[in-house]
Image (spheres, rainbow, N blue to C red):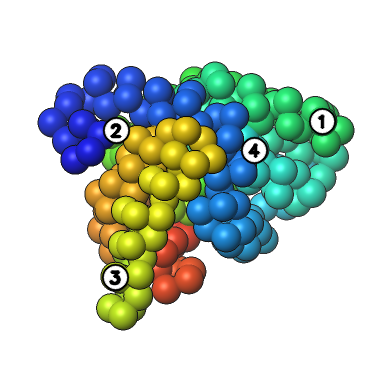
Amino acid sequence: THFGFKDVDAKEKQKLVAGVFSSVAGNYDLMNDLMSLGIHRVWKRYFTATAQVKPGDKVLDLAGGTGDIALLLRDRVGDTGTIVLGDINGDMLKVGRDRMINKGKVAGFEYTQVNAEHLPFPDNSFELVTIAFGLRNVTDKDQALREMFRVLKPGGQARVLEFSEVTQEWFKPIYDFHSFQVLPRLGELFAKDSDSYRYLAESIRKHPPQKELMQMMEQAGFERCHYKNLSAGIVAIHSGYKL
Ligand code: SAM
């Protein structure tokens, strides 16, 4: 691998991931638009619009980063609801919080620096737990899924939005070209950081494909698990319930 992620142990991986996100935090929103041609906005909108959530609910958005998902869910939980934005990286959280404050969004948000593998919340705390473009960065994904399950209230839903396996053969070479040629160059050009964007492409390829992730959710205790491909499987939405 280009970024030296292959043969490192779990602790080391966590440190490297932290470095990547500290390095990209300032450019994160711009880069998302550039790399996906703005389509990440459509995915996130769909992901939140189809979530099981109602006014007054308490939501945990893990790996919340600069707050796109939290913002979109805000209207759905209304004035009486709460959105807890959790991220392991203080720099990403800070960009997120500043951005919310600039938008005048203050009430109903909480920020907390947390590792998705060890959540500092009691059992049965949230009606909805989301993680968008975050699970693939987590070292022990099974542990993170078990934690998501634990903090959900019975009847609550967990949703994962993540890059997945492209389903159309003809599209694969184009996608690979974009990932391994275009992305690092965009990273170099706009963020002076091609390594972080190489890590991004590699982490996407290593992430478990649709069916495997669904099985991992079932293993973690979720029921009625489902997934839906968006944009020919470039991303997929997985959901499951704690019953
Ligand atoms: N959810 C946001 C979005 O969709 O724009 C941010 C996604 S960003 C690609 C991934 C985020 O995951 C980063 O902010 C990173 O700090 C966070 N992250 C990585 N490992 C984590 C972990 N173990 N626990 C919590 N957050 C983590």
Disc 1 or disc 2, which is closer to the eye? Answer: 1
Judged left or right of residue 206, residue 105 is right
Dot 3 or dot 2: first in sequence order is 2
> How far across and down, in percent of the image, does residue 87 sit?
52, 28
Alpha carbon separation for disc pair 1 and 2: 33 Å
Residue under label 3: 173
| Residue drawn at 23 percent across, 38 percent down | 2
Residue that appears at 42% across and 47% down: 185
| Foreground label between 3 and 4 | 3
Q: Are marks 1 and 3 in contact (CB under 8 Å)?
A: no
- Label 2 within 8 A of ligand 1 by Cβ: yes
Q: Visible in this render: residue 86?
A: no
Three-letter amino acid code at the position of disc 4 = Gly
Q: Nearer the viewer, residue 232 or 55?
A: 232
Give the mark toward the camera: 1 or 3.
3
Which amino acid does the dot numbered 3 rest on? Pro
Q: Earlier in the sequence, mark 3 or mark 4?
A: 4
Q: Earlier in the sequence, mark 2 or mark 4?
A: 4
Residue at the spot of label 1 = 102
Q: Is residue 219 above or below residue 194?
A: below
Mark 2, secondary structure of its residue: loop
Q: Give the side of residue 56 with respect to residue 211, left or right.
A: right
Q: Residues within 10 Å of mark 2 (few under 14, many from 20)?
A: some
Q: What SS does tag 4 mark?
A: loop
- Using the image as rendered, state which of residue 17 and residue 76 is in the foreground: 17
- Helix, strand or loop at disc 3? helix
Marks 1 and 4, how far apart at CA: 12 Å
Say the numbered circle drawn on residue 139: 2
